[in-house]
Amino acid sequence: MNKAKPITILSDYDITLFQGGNHCRLYQKLGSHATEVDGIKGVSFAVYAPAANIVSVIGNFNQWRAGTHDLYPRWDNSGVWEGFIPDLQPGTLYKYAIASHTGWKGIKADPYGRLHEHPPMTASVIWQDNHQWKDEEWMTHRHSRNRLGAAISTYEMHLASWRKNGDGTPLSYLQLAEQLPAYLNEMGFTHVEFMPVMEHPYDPSWGYQITGFFAPTSRFGTPDDFKYLIDQLHQHNIGVILDWVPSHFPTDGHGLGYFDGSHVYEHPDTRKGFHPDWQSLIFNYGRNEVKSFLISNALYWIDEYHADGLRVDAVASIVYLDYSRKEGEWEPNKFGGREYLEAIDFLKAMNETVYQYHPDIITIAEESTDFPGVSRPTYSGGLGFGMKWMMGWMHDTLGYFKQDPLYRKHHHNQITFSMIYQYSENYVLPFSHDEVVHGKGTLLSRMPGTGKDQFANLRLMLGYMFTHPGAKLLFMGCEFGQRNEWNFATQLEWGNLDFESHAGIMAWTKAMNHLYQHERALHECCTKPEGFQWVRVDDYQQSVLAYERIGLNPDKKVLVILNMTPVDRPQYRIGTEEHGEWTLLNHSDKPEYWGQGRDVPEKVVIEEMAWEHKTRSMEFALPGLTVVIYKWQKAKAEAKAKAEIKAEVNKTKLTKPAKLSKKKEVHKQEAKAKAEIKAEVKAEVNKTKLTKPAKLSKKKEVHKQEAKEKTVRKVLPKKSVPKAAGKQLKKK
């Protein structure tokens, strides 16, 4: 006897959307949901298994026996199986026992399950959410934190290996909620990015081989616990970005692969359906039901977990048919190209849907090629992502800094090339987990030199990252220059901080994070050409770079100068057209950063000395392997210029033998002018008397004299103009 009750969970409209690839909240219908039918509490089930002949719910409530609780196929041939099982409680374990028309049999976890057993166990768990959110203030204002031009500095982390308990177990979601927000606040990070938290069976995959796309891993607690962690981060003004993997999934027997005895989720053609590098399956992006599954999953983490963004993994592997394949191992599209057209359409639809419902979040593409328009709107032909990892910048930067400073002059173009394409996308500058594993070493170990020089190089590179246009991302451990490669099985080497050298790197990272947020010029126009100006780009011989960062207010500028060699340059001159002075914001050679504490002036005055086609110039002290950062403000520059003029005027007054007040000086000039006019008029009159037989009347003579006075007044200096004449001029 079948103990499951027939019910209809999905409407006809749901099915239409599902089959059209347009159902964006499928998680509300498919999967298991605690509900009540005819006054009886229980759980509804719905699963998509189009090739199935029988779908039975098995679990610890029926001794894992098939046949006692069979689901019912919908009448519309949609491939959806539904049913209601009374008296089931949250916490119950379950799976689907599926038999196909071909005789295939398999036992599968729920693709829409919200909780799964702790690996290596693989059952799904009936779950009912109970968390009450308290992040209203963050949610109300998060657009301002996630928009282009906001200061976005992201701390990328792997939850299991950040810190460990004394017994070697990783911190739980609740323990992380106690420790992580305060740490991120102290360090000045604005966002945290979690490597995949979705359920996965294999620890060494770091979470990138997902079997439970709708379930946070039970390794660290319950779904409510994970929501509490995000809630706490939001209450501490930290945004949360989740690593999302729609590019592939593992072949584990309980997972999505060959789900009902057919290729439901993966493409049946191995040229499109199997990834040779990762030995995993690839979604069939051209199947509408799969498209609905993936888009619903993206929206689920934003809807239900208040995620502020999704970092989409391995986008290049999605958009190219020939990714990691040799000639003959892939099939061109209908136009003969290598672009995976259906996958591209899926990414566009995903981004459009996410931004339609949540315009205040960000989607970020990890895309390592020059695929055009990744972070451009779909209506202009782009993929619709908000941002893109700047992989080229990362490779070029690490390649440059690993060079011995003696030879950096030969690689100067490597460090300047990024600005050629900076504004082709909305970029994130990543130093991610991929750069500190697989024998690559750490950021610190890549730096040339030993002792002071090695740490100075790391501070210099981090200073370059924080002042270069683009959002920032730094993998955990890099903030204090961890010595050894990241190991997912252990915690970070927090003991490094017992050494002043590493503590100095942490202090520098903290200072740069706070400077990046405080100085608007460093972030407001990171996606606009007007936000960056080269000052010195061609001094490859001395390996010096200088550039200005400019915000929405062009009257405030930040000047960044990097000395890429250990050679001190105490009198480095740079041309300018500005007036005033530059004020020091920070430099990387301070003792608190484990620098040498060499002298860097707090103020640099702009001099009236032409230099390199500029009418003025200024002279900086540049310690070796140091970045110096200065600020200029137009208002202060103008005030200084006025003060200098006033001082010059006062100096001139002091040098005069007889000092008169301004009012007395004007009267003196007026009296002198009148006397000169009278003398001239008198001479003219006398001359006329001698030469003319007829005399002018007294009245005519007066008129002539007045006209003469007016003419003279017009040519007098401004300070000499009589008061009445001055009023006449103002009226004009």
Image: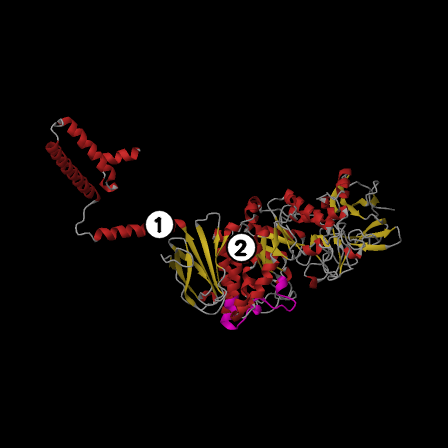
Q: How many marks?
A: 2
Amino acid type of the residue tagged 2 in the rendering: Pro
Amino acid type of the residue that numbered disc 1 sits on in the rendered structure? Ala
Secondary structure found at label 2: loop
* Residue 641 position within the rendered picture, expressed as x and y whole percent measured from the top left: 34, 51
Q: Nearer the viewer, residue 378 or 104?
A: 378
In this picture, residue 345 sits left or right of residue 76: left
Residue 197 found in image quarter? bottom right
The answer to whether residue 98 is seen in the rendering is yes
Classify 10 Å Cα crowding around label 1: few (below 14), some (14-19), many (20 and above).
Answer: few
Residue underneath mark 2: 469
Q: Is residue 699 above or below residue 548?
A: above
Magenta region, residue range = 433-457
Along the horizontal axis of the image, is 173 left or right of 267?
left
The residue that disc 1 covers is 639
Q: Nearer the viewer, residue 383 or 675?
A: 675
